[in-house]
Amino acid sequence: MYKKHKQYRLFNFDYSQDGYYFITIVTKDREHFFGEIVNRQMIYTPIGEYAKNNILKFYADEILDNPYQNNPLFINNTSSVIGITKWSILPNHIHLIIEIINKEVKEYTTITGLSPYQKVR
């Protein structure tokens, strides 16, 4: 009858549109699958190392002229590019800021209130 979990998504929002999105991934039962912090440094487990290596494939390197040049989605010429601009792996969760860039131009209009940008129909 009542929701058991808080709803973190905006109703009717198109999450495929251009923008930056903050994502947190938490392990089941908050188990330390990704590693441990020892002397203020993250020591990765094999799973944590695997997660880090896959995050780095999509990392947008701002030092490069084209920050997405190493991104597999950019290389394969897909219709959109997903880049990870900031990330952090902790023992039981991962934080990511993901940027979505659509190669086709879409128009959006602002809505009053707390709603995000919406597509022009």
Image (cartoon, rainbow, N blue to C red):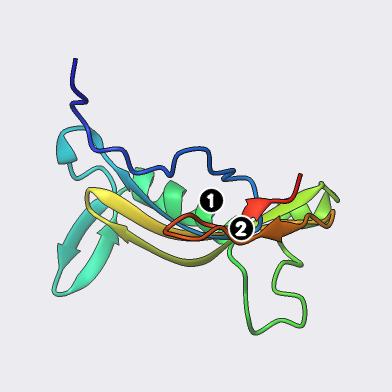
Image-quadrant location for residue 25? top left
Above-or-below relation of 47 to 43: above
| In this rendering, position of residue 54 left or right of residue 38 | right
Between label 1 and label 2, give the one nearer the viewer: 2
In-front residue for pair 116/30:
116
Above-or-below relation of 40 to 71: below
Q: Which residue is mark 1?
A: 54
Question: For the residues marked 1 and 2, what is the alpha-carbon distance in whole angstroms?
Answer: 7 Å
Q: Looking at the image, do the residues carrying marks 1 and 2 touch, with CB atoms under 8 Å apart?
A: yes
Identify the residue at horizontal 58%, vertical 64% (top origin).
Answer: 59
Q: Which residue is mark 2?
A: 58
Identify the residue at horizontal 63%, vertical 80% (top origin).
Answer: 62
Numbered disc 2: secondary structure: loop
**x, y percent for residue 44:** 30, 56
Identify the residue at horizontal 13%, vertical 74% (top origin).
Answer: 39
Disc 1 crowd, CA 10 A, few/some/many (<14, 14-19, 20+): few
**x, y percent for residue 81:** 71, 55
Q: Amino acid at mark 2?
A: Phe
Numbered disc 1: secondary structure: helix
